[in-house]
Amino acid sequence: MLPPDPRSPLHEDPPPDFHLDRALLRRRFSRAAARCDEADFLVREIAQRMDERLDYIRIAPRRILDLGCGTGGDLERLGARYPAAGRIGIDFAEPMLARARQRLAPRAGGLRRLFGGAKPALQLAAADAARLPLPDASVTLVWSNLMLPAIDAPQPVLREMHRVLECGGLAMFSTLGPDTLRELRDALPPRGGERVHRFIDMHDLGDALLRAGFADPVMDMEMLTLTYTRLDELFADLRIAGANNAARARARGLDGRAGWETARARYETLRREGRLPVSIEIIQGHAWKTAPAAPRPDGRAVVRLHPPARRPAG
């Protein structure tokens, strides 16, 4: 397999248009913790779709990691599906975890009690997704719902997912594809820097899973169209969710009032039946951690790829 193109977001040092301001993201998500549940309809919808996929996957996890757990909504869902499993929620914004503790108390405990003695049903910890404070092979299922858009270089994160999974464990995630917010991207002027967040292509993520050591990756994409009566409602939802553009190359203005009026006029040409469309490209993926293949006599390893199993009809 060839190494990733240095212009690809899969490279260890992604191209400039994929560089995100990590400190800004942490501040925004920290501020958003108080209100993000008011605008989490997309997160909840995708969580339901991910959960439905588990109906067709045979796995009985001992311990589950929700990576990018936010205020804990998915931890509740996972607890309902797998009541006997220990659950770990990790997020890089401590205020998000504070809200999760309020939501899930008194069940939430500290990560220090995770691997010794009588463990609580749930642990929460603040950490970077590329440096997880977990032992190797310590979880059975890694679940990550819409965390990857906040990562500009996914390869280290996927490697960490692979490291903490036990053999036979499953990584399941969702993210957003390049056609997300395409109407807004087209309406805004192209000059002056990145004006809309960049998203990584599904096929690039599939390759990244293989590079991280996963087997049998399954990737799916579907388009969802949201509608708004006013463009300001979209902007408000993005702000409440902490999802504003955080590219380091982002533009710092829009050519004044005239620039905004031009962008709004362009977007208004898309209005149908009184509503403005907003495209969301939803990507879902899952892959397994398998035991390393025995090397050939010449020292080369053998990697076997299998087509994904089809869902039952109906």
Image (spheres, rainbow, N blue to C red):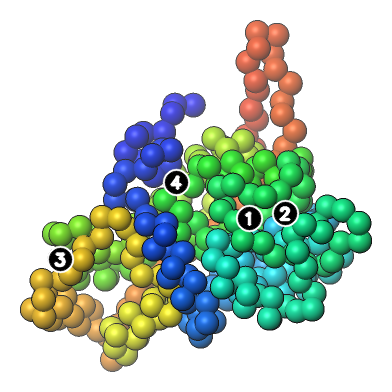
Using the image as rendered, state which of residue 283 and residue 253 is in the foreground: 253
Q: Secondary structure at mark 4?
A: loop
* Residue at horizontal 32 percent and vertical 90 percent from the top: 229
| Residue located beneath label 2 in the image | 141
Mark earlier in primary sequence (4, 3): 4
Q: Secondary structure at mark 1?
A: strand
Q: Are marks 1 and 2 in contact (CB under 8 Å)?
A: yes
**Distance in Å between CA atoms under marks 1 and 2:** 8 Å
Q: Are marks 4 and 2 in contact (CB under 8 Å)?
A: no
| Residue located beneath label 1 in the image | 172
Q: Residues within 10 Å of mark 3 (few under 14, many from 20)?
A: some
Q: Secondary structure at mark 3?
A: loop
Quarter containing the C terminus: bottom right
- Indicate left or right for 118 with 15 as reference: right
Q: Secondary structure at mark 2?
A: strand
Q: Is residue 311 visible?
A: no
117 versus 203 height, above or below = below
241 versus 162 height, above or below = below
Residue 189 bears which disc, if any?
3
Q: Position of residue 260 (x, y in %)?
A: 15, 78
Q: Residues within 10 Å of mark 4 (few under 14, many from 20)?
A: many
* Residue at horizontal 56 percent and vertical 53 percent from the top: 128
- Indicate left or right for 233 with 85 as reference: left
